[in-house]
Image: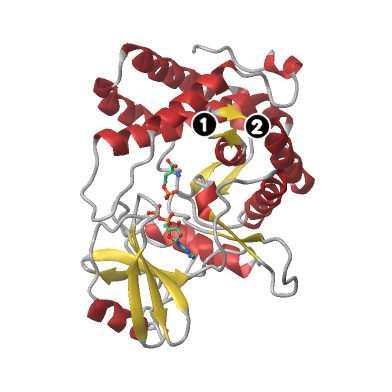
C-alpha cells in the first residue's frame, strides 16, 4: 500500500494495548498496495497489520471484516480481524443489523476507520507457475463454497454501476481508439448483464481482487526444504456479493496472463481452471459466459487504473499501477476464443465490441 495517513507511534501503541495484543515495539509503513494505509505493527506478542481505510466508510467495513472472520472460522487461511473488547457485537440476523451499528472490528485511528489483523507468513509469488495457479484455483473454489452461508449482502462496489459512473470521468483523458474501446465494452457488458445466462450464474461473497500480490506462499513447518505452498489470502476490501465466475475471471486475468504482452498463458489458464473445477465444477451458464466475464474483469481494472492514474490522491508512498496493461488484456480478451472450446463461443451473447 501507500501511506496516505501517517499514524503516530503512541496512538498505535494505545490501540494494540486496548486490543490485548501486547506492547508495540515497531510500526512500519508498507509500500505495496494502492487503496488503504497499511502498517506492519510488531508487539511482544506477535506480528500484525494495521489498516486505515481511506475511501471506504464505516458502513461498508463490517461486510469485509465479518467475511474474513467467517472464512477464518471455516478454516480458510485469511487474516483474522481483532475485536475491541469494549464493543459488544449487535445481536440479531446480520441483515437486520443497521449499517451504522458499532462493529467490534472497526477502530478509529488518526480520524479514520481502521482494522488490526494477523500478519500472514510468507511472501507473494509474483511469477507464478502452473503449480501456483493450481493452488490458487483450489483456494478460490474453497473460499466461494465456505462463504456461501455468510449472512451479509453487499454489492461489489466496483461492479457494473461503478463502471458506468466512472467511464465518463476518465473518458476525457483517452485517445480516440481507447474511448471507442471503453464505450463499446461498456455497452457489451450492459448487454450481457441483461441475458438469462447472466441471471443463471451462481453468486455469493467474492474477493474480487485476488491478484498475485494478495496471496501468500510459505514453506510448511512440517516440510522444511520443500517449495512454499499457498499460505493465505488477504486484502478483502474490494469483496462483495457478485458472480463466482467474475471472481474466477479476475484471477485468470492476473495469474494466467503474460504480463509483458497481456496475452493469456495456456498452461496456467488450464491449471487454474481445472483446479477450481476439481472443487466446484462450473455450471453451463458460467461456461457460456466465462469469455464475457474475462472481458468484464479486464474492463473493471482498466477503469480503476485509469481513475487512479488520472485522478490520483495524495500519498506519502504511492506507486500507481499501469492502466495500459489492462487495456492490452481487454483487447486480447475481446478477440480471444473461448477457454474451453470454440463451439461454445457461438452460444455467447452477441458482441457489441
Ligand atoms: N495480513 C497481512 N499479512 C501479511 N502482509 C500483509 C497483510 N496485509 C497486507 N500485507 C502487506 O501489505 C501490502 C499491501 O497490502 P494491501 O492490502 O494489498 O494494500 P491495499 O489495500 O492498499 O491495496 C501487501 O502487499 C502485503 O505485503
Ligand atoms: N489489484 C488492483 C489494484 C488494487 O490494489 P491492491 O494493492 O489492493 O490489490 C490492480 O492491480 O489494479
Q: Estimate the x, y position of residue 214 in percent, counting from the top left.
A: 51, 53
Query: Is residue 126 among what the camera can see?
Result: yes
* Element marked by disc 1: loop
Near mark 2 (Cα within 10 A), the count class, few <14, some 14-19 or many ≥20, is some
Viewport quadrant of the N terminus: bottom left
Among all residues in the image, which is located at the extreme right? 278
**Residue shown at 72%/72% (left/top)?**
224
The image quarter containing residue 335 is: top right
* Element marked by disc 2: loop
Pointer 2: what residue? 265
**Residue shown at 22%/74% (left/top)?**
8
Q: Is residue 102 above or below residue 312?
A: below
Q: Is residue 79 above or below residue 86?
A: above
Q: Estimate the x, y position of residue 348 in percent, counting from the top left.
A: 64, 18
Pointer 1: what residue? 260
Q: Estimate the x, y position of residue 321 in percent, counting from the top left.
A: 38, 40
The image quarter containing residue 64 is: bottom left
Instruction: State which tag comes first along the sequence, 1 or 2.
Output: 1
Amino acid at each position: 500500500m501507500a501511506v496516505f495517513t501517517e499514524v503516530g507511534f503512541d496512538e498505535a501503541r494505545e490501540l494494540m494495548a486496548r486490543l490485548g495484543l501486547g506492547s508495540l515495539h515497531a510500526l512500519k509503513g508498507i509500500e505495496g498496495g494502492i487503496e488503504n494505509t497499511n502498517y506492519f505493527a510488531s508487539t511482544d506478542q506477535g506480528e500484525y497489520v494495521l489498516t486505515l481505510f481511506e475511501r471506504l466508510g464505516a458502513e461498508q467495513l463490517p461486510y469485509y471484516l465479518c467475511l474474513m472472520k467467517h472464512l477464518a472460522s471455516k478454516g480458510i487461511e485469511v487474516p483474522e480481524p481483532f475485536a475491541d473488547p469494549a464493543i459488544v457485537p449487535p445481536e440479531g440476523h446480520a441483515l437486520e443489523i443497521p449499517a451504522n451499528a458499532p462493529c467490534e472490528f472497526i477502530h478509529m485511528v488518526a480520524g479514520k476507520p481502521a482494522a488490526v489483523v494477523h500478519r500472514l507468513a510468507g511472501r507473494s509469488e509474483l511469477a507464478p507457475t502452473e503449480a501456483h495457479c493450481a493452488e490458487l484455483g483450489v483456494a478460490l473454489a474453497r473460499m466461494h463454497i465456505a462463504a456461501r452461508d455468510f449472512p451479509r449482502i453487499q454489492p461489489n462496489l466496483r461492479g457494473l454501476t461503478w463502471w458506468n459512473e466512472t467511464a465518463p470521468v476518465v473518458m476525457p483523458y483517452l485517445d480516440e481508439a481507447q474511448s471507442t474501446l471503453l464505450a463499446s465494452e461498456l455497452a457489451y457488458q450492459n448487454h450481457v448483464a441483461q441475458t438469462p445466462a447472466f441471471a443463471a450464474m451462481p453468486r455469493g461473497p467474492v474477493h474480487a481482487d485476488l491478484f498475485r500480490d494478495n496471496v501468500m506462499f510459505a514453506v510448511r513447518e512440517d516440510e522444511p526444504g520443500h517449495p512454499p505452498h499457498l499460505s493465505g489470502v488477504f486484502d478483502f476490501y474490494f469483496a462483495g456479493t457478485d458472480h463466482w465466475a467474475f471472481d474466477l475471471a479476475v484471477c485468470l486475468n492476473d495469474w494466467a496472463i503474460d504480463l509483458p504482452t497481456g496475452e493469456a498463458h495456456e498452461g496456467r489458464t488450464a491449471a487454474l481452471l481445472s483446479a477450481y473445477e476439481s472443487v466446484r465444477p462450473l455450471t453451463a451458464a458460467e461456461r457460456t459466459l466465462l469469455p464475457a466475464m474475462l472481458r468484464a474483469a479486464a474492463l473493471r481494472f482498466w477503469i480503476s487504473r485509469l481513475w487512479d492514474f488520472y485522478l490520483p490522491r495524495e500519498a506519502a508512498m504511492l506507486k500507481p499501477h499501469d492502466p495500459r496493461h489492462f487495456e492490452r488484456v481487454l483487447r486480447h480478451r475481446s478477440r480471444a476464443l473461448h477457454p474451453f472450446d470454440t463451439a461454445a463461443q457461438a452460444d455467447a451473447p452477441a458482441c457489441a465490441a
